[in-house]
Amino acid sequence: MNNDIKSILVSEEECQEIVSRIADKISEEYRGRRLLLVCILKGSVVFMGDLMKKIHIPVEIDFMKVSSYGRSSKSSGTVNILLDLYRSDLPETDILIVEDIIDSGRTLSYLVEYLKLKGARSVKTVTMLDKPSRREVDFVPDYRGKVIPDEFVVGYGLDYAEKYRALPYIGILKPEVYEK
Ligand code: IMP
Ligand code: MG
């Protein structure tokens, strides 16, 4: 285990089980539709990569980037779009936004409204992790991997100051790592 990790919250094996379960549900519910997975960079890339392999209906993929936490472990509260979706086929497209973790809920509640206004046929959300105790706005994802307590976690795409994204499990960071 990495030295900066206090404990493992979701093992590599459990991550794969979670993704398989969600992928089966999505495959069933989107059968016969034009499904576009929109990955929110960068934290969701690992989840997106695993999820798209396990969904057994045709999918298209795209990417958006929004302003993030920067170097701190606290939310800034505002959402800025740094990389937008440029497509002319949104009226025929069912979008599923793929997110790593929901904290305040601000990012996803904003993006869902934004993509609906852009004209997508439907917009739903899937998140690997959810910290409902941290909500600042009402938001419930359509598909959810695991509910976790209010701890700062890294790995499986999630970072602290751009580190730890490649860890194959999700772990709780030692507080002294971000308090120093
Ligand atoms: P929200 O808009 O507050 O829901 O922010 C969600 C975003 O905050 C996620 O996409 C992550 O990039 C980041 N985030 C929230 N909690 C954590 C965490 O525990 N570790 C790493 N990133 C986090
Ligand atoms: Mg993110």
Image (tube, grey):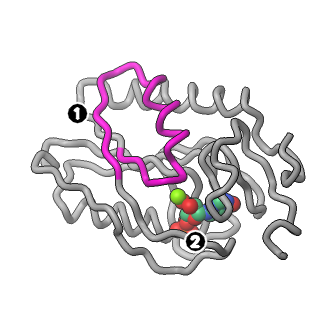
Mark count: 2
Residue at 46% across, 80% down: 78
Whether disc 1's CB lies below 8 Å from ligand 2 is answered no
Q: Quadrant of ligand 1?
A: bottom right
Note whether 74 is above or below 131 in the view shown: below
| Label 2 crowd bin: few (<14), some (14–19), many (20+), radius 10 Å | some
Q: Is residue 132 visible in this depiction of the protein?
A: no
Residue interval drawn in magenta: 38-63
Residue at 31% across, 51% down: 123
- Amino acid type at image mark 2: Tyr
User: How far is mark 1 from mark 2, CA to CA?
Assistant: 32 Å
- Residue 16: x and y in percent read 64, 28
Note whether 67 is above or below 23 in the view shown: below
User: In the rendered image, which residue does mark 1 sit on?
Assistant: 34
Residue at 34% across, 69% down: 81
Observer-nearest of 55 and 8: 8
- Residue 96: x and y in percent read 36, 45
Element at label 1: loop
Residue at 23% across, 31% down: 33
- Does residue 91 show up magenta in the picture? no
Q: Residue furthest left?
A: 88
